[in-house]
């Protein structure tokens, strides 16, 4: 066996990443958003925050709806 036969693309690319927010290790392609659409094959084109944490962050920062009524004088 030669060295080239032992190495596969999976060994060179990272398929798991640790989320910066929750700290869980998740699948890179399924659980993270793609931030650079032109470079789909590179691991650096994916976010460091998982989809679940991103959704929670967006929901918490969303402006609250104000139920305001005109004063009845």
Image (cartoon, rainbow, N blue to C red):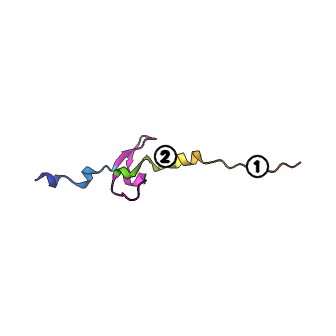
Find residue 53 and name its label: 2
Which residue is at 43% across, 41% downward? 20
Which residue is at 36% across, 46% downward? 17
Say whether residue 65 is magenta. no
Q: Give percent across and percent down for residue 30.
A: 40, 54
SS at badge 1: loop
* Range shown magenta: 16-42
Q: Which is more toward the observer, 20 or 45?
A: 45
Mark 1 vs 2, N-terminal side: 2
Q: Residue furthest left?
A: 1
Horizontal arrangement in the rendering, residue 38 relative to residue 1 (left or right): right
Image depth: mark 1 or mark 2 in front: 1
Q: Give percent across and percent down for residue 14.
A: 31, 49
| Label 1 environment density (alpha carbons within 10 Å; few <14, some 14–19, many ≥20) | few
Q: Residue furthest right?
A: 73
Which residue is at 25% across, 55% downward? 9
| Label 2 environment density (alpha carbons within 10 Å; few <14, some 14–19, many ≥20) | some
Location of residue 24 with respect to 9 vertically, above or below: above
Which residue is at 79% across, 50% downward? 69
According to the picture, the residue beneath numbered tag 1 turns out to be: 68
Q: Give percent across and percent down for residue 22.
A: 45, 41
Q: CA distance from mark 1 to mark 2?
A: 31 Å
Horizontal arrangement in the rendering, residue 56 relative to residue 25 (left or right): right
Q: Give percent across and percent down for residue 68.
A: 76, 49
Say whether residue 34 is magenta. yes
SS at badge 2: helix
Q: Which is more toward the observer, 43 or 29?
A: 43
Find residue 12 and name its label: none
**What is the tally of numbered marks visible in this picture?**
2
Q: Are marks 1 and 2 in contact (CB under 8 Å)?
A: no
């Amino acid at each position: 066996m030669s060295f080239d036969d032992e190495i596969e693309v999976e060994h060179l690319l990272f398929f798991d990443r640790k989320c910066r927010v929750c700290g869980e290790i998740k699948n890179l392609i399924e659980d993270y958003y793609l931030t650079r659409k032109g470079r789909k094959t590179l691991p650096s084109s994916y976010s460091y925050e998982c989809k679940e944490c991103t959704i929670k962050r967006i929901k918490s920062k969303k402006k609250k709806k104000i139920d305001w009524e005109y004063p009845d004088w």
